[in-house]
Image (cartoon, grey):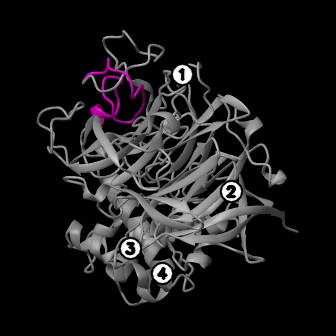
Amino acid sequence: MNSRKFPFINTLLVIVFIFLTGCKDSPKENKETAKDQKDKYAYGEMEWQQGMEIFNEKCASCHNFEMNEIGPNLSGITSEVDKDWLKAFIHNPQKVIESGDERAVAKFETFKLYMPPFPEIQGDELENLLGFIHRFSEAEKKNKNARPGGLINPIPEKLASSNLNLVLEEWLTIPASADKAPLARINTFLPLKTDTGERLFISDLRGELYEIVDDTVQVYLDLSKEPDFFHSPGWGNGLGSFAFHPEFEKNGLLYTTHTVPGETATADFAIPEGIEAKLQWVITEWKTENPSAKKYNGTKREVVRMDMYNRAHGLQEIVFNPFAKKGEPDYGLLYLGIGDGTAALAGHPELTDSFSHIWSSILRIDPLGTNGRNGNYGIPEDNPFVGDSEKLDEIWARGFRNPHRFAWNEKNPSQMLVSNIGQHSVEEVNLIKKGADYGWPNREGSFLYDVDANTELVYPLPEDDSKYTNPVIQYDHDEGNAVCGGYFYNGDNIPLLKGKYIFGDIPQGTFFYSEASDIVDGQQSKVLRMGVELNGKTTTLKEITKNTRVEVRMGQDSQGELYIFTKSDGKVYKVIGCNESN
């Protein structure tokens, strides 16, 4: 029921949290520590999303976590009252009032109105609602500058569903790299175009780089045997990415990224003195003796090493522009997508808000050059800040929390997209412009972000916002949790996908598309949901994987056809069609 159409409902909804806030002398006052509360309340992005959806449906028209407006400020509520008391009151407020509870009676005497009971909110839904309230109310207590106007639901319009379903065919399963869940951590899929066709490769974060041969896989290179190789489940590190030089068949050069513990060796890009680096990302060049061999054998050299503040949001992807031709400026140049290493919210936003640091940036280097800071790579002369003493020559663009995947449109080479995983409000895809600033940690999507305010919220933009470049695609966290960068469909087998940029949401396992013709700088492209079919049945990846957290990734071969894989169970699917549903 829409509370805006029925004003009395707003009043009733106000009462629910009026009883829950503002009175600290209740005998059920909660004295638990922050750790006790974290352990007691539902924790996790998926749980908070469901809680937020319930909150937006039933409470958000009256309440926020900042100030008393139509309803009371919810900041700190879970520190003021016991969780069991909250549950009891939500289920039957009249019963709690008539029991003589101090808090409930005091508020009832003020407002003279019973809140309607919500007994239908039970089980996980109730736990997740309270987990969301706890997370956001605790974050508001840390709002050092008391910034008002936080947006719990920054994009209230829901994404429309298209009538298109991706038709999947299960193809193969990557071998388990552990004896307990997650059994595999497959992360990157890449084709290698050859004179006789193509070869397909897929990697596991635990260190194995596989080649797919005759619908099976075999290890091509195992980085887990590298000295000090380090990975930790859930943090996006280990063997992060790999890229074949466009002349691999001639020069045999392959590039990889992997993690090692902090201070393993001197970093070319070091965290400033006084700040601990938890780990390092290393780019390695591997030169194979025989480019056509099915197993790597050759030499290696280190290209560049960089410190990272923490284990997450590191060096997500390295990639060559797959459509650049010899003689063109982009040919043979390597792009690096570097996240903030969580430093922005850990007291060091200055590391991630500067053209003089690499973090939160996209770098562009020549791996065969020698004029970089360590002599092991080069700096392209057409990089935007070459010669600027206050900015790094390596930077192509900056302002990203976690730049996850790159995509170029073969039909329109000026369309270079980078997906950027958001904090807690907005997922985004950016149309990359040379030298542009995309805003993090001062922007999340097309909204203001403030590391000194409630870090679970975004805020309306100021009137003058010309400094930053907004994304061309975005959705908020009642649609998903972490954007999975996708691809422009360039294949010939599925006409319904022509002209579309197809992408997904990592934990939810859902898919979306935008028309390539709608992706224009300075405006938001329309986003439509897509369905999934497998074995003739409309389904979802959650149903297929039997996992509430899907961990989906996407790949594309050299013919432009698409692949879907689910990281935690090692399953790889071909996209073999697209059906129009009724």
Q: Quadrant of the C terminus?
A: bottom right
Q: Which residues are magenta?
A: 349-373
Q: Earlier in the sequence, mark 3 or mark 1?
A: 3
**What kind of residue is marked 3?**
Ala
Q: Earlier in the sequence, mark 4 or mark 1?
A: 4
Per the image, is 544 magenta?
no
Does 460 sit above or below residue 96? above
Q: How far apart are the alpha carbons under marks 2 and 1?
A: 27 Å
Determine which residue is flagged by label 2: 158
Residue 136 appears in which quarter of the rendering? Answer: bottom left
Q: Earlier in the sequence, mark 3 or mark 4?
A: 3
User: Residue 264 in the image: x percent, y percent?
Assistant: 15, 45
User: Residue 280 in the image: x percent, y percent?
Assistant: 24, 44
The local secondary structure at tag 4 comes to helix
Determine which residue is flagged by label 3: 42
Does 452 sit above or below residue 166? above
Determine which residue is flagged by label 4: 124
Q: Looking at the image, which is closer to me, 80 or 565?
A: 565
